Amino acid sequence: MCGITGIFDTRADREVDAARLHRMNESQYHRGPDEGSLHTEPGLGMGHRRLSIIDISTGQQPLFNEDGSVVVVFNGEIYNYQSLIPELQALGHVFHTKSDTECIVHAWEAWGEDCVQRFRGMFAFALWDRNKQTFFMARDRMGVKPLFYSVLDDGQLLFGSELKSLLAHGQMRRDIDPLAVEEYFALGYVAEPRCIFKQARKLEPGYSLCIRRGQPIPEPKQFWDVRFTLDRQIGVEEACLELQERLKQSVRLRMIAEVPLGAFLSGGVDSSAVVATMAGISSDAVNTCSIAFDDPAFNESEFAKLVADRYRTEHKVETVKSDDFDLLDTLARLYDEPYADSSAIPTYRVCQLARKHVTVALSGDGGDETFGGYRRYRMHLMEERMRSMMPAGLRKPLFGTLGRLYPKADWAPRVFRAKTTFEGLSRNAVEAYFHSVSILRGPMREQLFSPQFKAQLSGYEAQEVFDRHAAKAQTDDPLALIQYLDTKTYLVGDINTKVDRASMAHSLEVREPLMDHELVEWVASLPSDLKIRGQEGKYLLKKSMEPLLPDEVLYRPKMGFAVPLARWFRGPLKQRVQDAVLGPRLAATGWFNREYLQHLVEAHQSGARDYSAPLWTLLMFEAFLRQVVDEELPLAVHSRDGVPA
C-alpha cells in the first residue's frame, strides 16, 4: 500500500522538473512513511511513497525490469502474484525481488495491455516502456485504489493516488467544474470519471489508459465489467457451501503480509463474516478493532463483542464521543474534493485505532452492494412491483401530482412518509433509484442554485451519471440493475473513497475480501432471490454464516455507521452551521440562492424539518473551499463546453 505520483511528457522528452516531482511525492507522505523514491529520465518523472507490507527488504519502487527499459510505480496488492511468478519465469523473465510489484513489469512484457486481466487484487499503477515509448496506467476492477490524472496545456500528464499530489505540481488549473458541483450536491461525492477541478480526471475502475508519446491521447479503455447474468442454477444449501469456500479463498489471499494484520469488527454481518472466516483460517488469535459510541442509538459494540468472544480475538475497543465533530476541517483537507458522507468521522477513528496495533486490516466493505443488503433495495423492489401494475401514461401524471401535493413529513413514522414514494412511482426505475439516493433531490437543487450557476450547467443533471451506467448494465432485473448502479457509483465514489483516505491518513492498509472480483462475478451469476428473499436482505450470506455467527448478529436490524448530525446542528454546531452556510465563503461564489440557504438553516434549527444531510453537504463544501482551494486564485466556473463563465 503506497502513494504514487508522476509526470509524463506526452509530446516530447522535455526535462521534468525534479523539484516539482519531489513536492508532489511528499504531499502523499502519509500514504507511505517507510520510504520515498524518485526516478527521472527525459520526459518522465515517477515518485513513490512506500508502506512496506510484502517483500519489505527488496520491494522498493520505482521498480524496473531486467534491463531497466520498463519502470513501474504501484499502489495496492496483487494477491495472486505467487502463482504468476513461476508462470512468468517459465516465459524467461528473471525476478530480482519477491514482490508483487515486479510481477507487473514482467506481465507487461509478456502480455502488454492485457496484463491487467491476469491480476487479482486492488491496484492502481503507472508504467513506462522506454523501448515502445508507451505510458500505461490502470485501476483495479472495483475501484478500491484511486488514480487521478490531469493533462496540462503544454501536454504534460500528471498522475497521483490523491488529488493533492496534482495540486502540488503548481500548474494545474483550479477552475471548478459546475457539473461536478451538481453531482456533489446530488450524491455527496463527485462521480467517476469527473473531478471537482475541470482539468483533472479520475481513471474509472476496470479501465486502463495507454499513451504512445507523440500521438493523440486516447480515451481510457474498459478491461472489465460485472455482468449480472442471474443464470446459475443452484440450490440454497449448495450455494451456501460454495460461498463459504469462495470467501475462505478471498480472505486467505488477503492475509498474506509480513506485518501485523487484523480486521475491523463493527458487529454487522459483513465484518463479522470476515472475522469468522479469518478465525477459521488462522492458527493465531485474530486482531480485531471496534469503535463504540457513547450514544446508545449509534452503538453496535455489544454485537462486535459477541463475535470477538466467540472467536477469542485480540479485541480492541475505543469509545467515540457523540460530539466528535472536530475532524471537519481535517476531513476536507484529507479528501481533496468535497465529500459529504458523515460516517467518514467514525471511519477515520477506527482506522486510527487499528493502526496502533496492526498495519493491515481486513474490512467487510462491499457486502451490501454484492449481496443485496441495503434497505433501499427492498423499498425499490416494492415500488417496482407497484410500477409494473400501471401503464406509464397513467402512472406518471397520477403519482407525479400526488407527490407534488402530499406534504413532506420528516417527523412522521416512516410508513406515513408517502411523498417520496409517490415521487418515485411517477418515474422509471433508474430515475426513481437516483431520486431515492440523492441527498438534495432535483427540486431542492433547483432551489439551492442561483440562476447564474444553473445557466452554467447548460441543462446538465447528475441523473445522467446513472443513465450512462444503466445503459451498460445489460440486465432488466430490478435488483441487479440497482446493484450494478451502486457498484459503479456509490461503492466507488463514497465507500471506497472514504476507506482509502481515512486508512491512508494513518498509513494503514485496508483489504476488502467481499470485493474480490471473482467472488463478485460469482454472486452476480446467482438469481436475485438468493440475495433478497421476502424482507430479508443478504439472504445467502446470512444463511451461509448461520453455522459461524449468532442469530443476534445475523438477523438484527441494520444500524449503519452513523453520527448524530441532526442533534449537532441544533446544538453544539448550531453557530458553526450558520457561519458556514450563511457566511461569506459560499456567498462569494455566486452559486447559491441565499434565501434557500436561510430556509435550510432556520427550518432545521427550529425543528420544523430535518435538513441535517443537506446542511452537512453544504458544510463540507464550504470547508473544501477554505481548506483546498487556494483563495489567492480566482474561482472560475466553466460552462458545459468549457468556456469560462
Image (cartoon, rainbow, N blue to C red):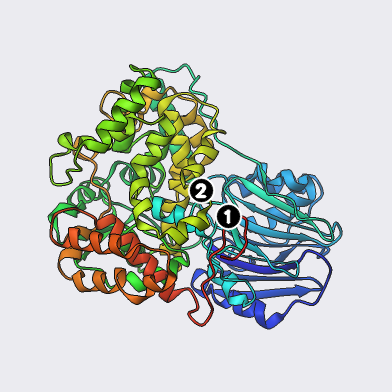
Please state which amino acid type lies under the numbered disc 1. Arg
| Residues at discs 1 and 2 in contact (Cβ within 8 Å) | yes
Q: Residue 80 at what x, y percent from top left?
A: 60, 46
Which comes sooner in the sequence, label 1 or label 2? Answer: 2
Q: Residue 143 at what x, y percent from top left?
A: 53, 50
Left of 326 or right of it: where is 574? Answer: left
| Residue 531 to residue 275: above or below | above
Mark 2 surroundings within 10 Å by alpha-carbon count, few (fewer than 14), some (14 through 19), many (20 or more): few
Q: Is residue 305 visible?
A: yes
Left of 460 or right of it: where is 575? Answer: left
- Disc number placed over residue 401 in the picture, else none: none
Please state which amino acid type lies under the numbered disc 2. Gly
Q: Which of 8/579 is in front? A: 579
Left of 369 or right of it: where is 545? Answer: left
- Disc number placed over residue 640 in the picture, else none: 1
Q: Which of 478/119 is in front? A: 478
CA gap, disc 1 to disc 2?
Answer: 9 Å
| Residue 171 to residue 521: above or below | below
Q: Which of 472/463 is in front? A: 463
- Disc number placed over residue 459 in the picture, else none: 2
SS for callout 1: loop
Q: Residue furthest front?
A: 451
Mark 1 surroundings within 10 Å by alpha-carbon count, few (fewer than 14), some (14 through 19), many (20 or more): some
Q: Residue 504 at what x, y percent from top left?
A: 46, 65
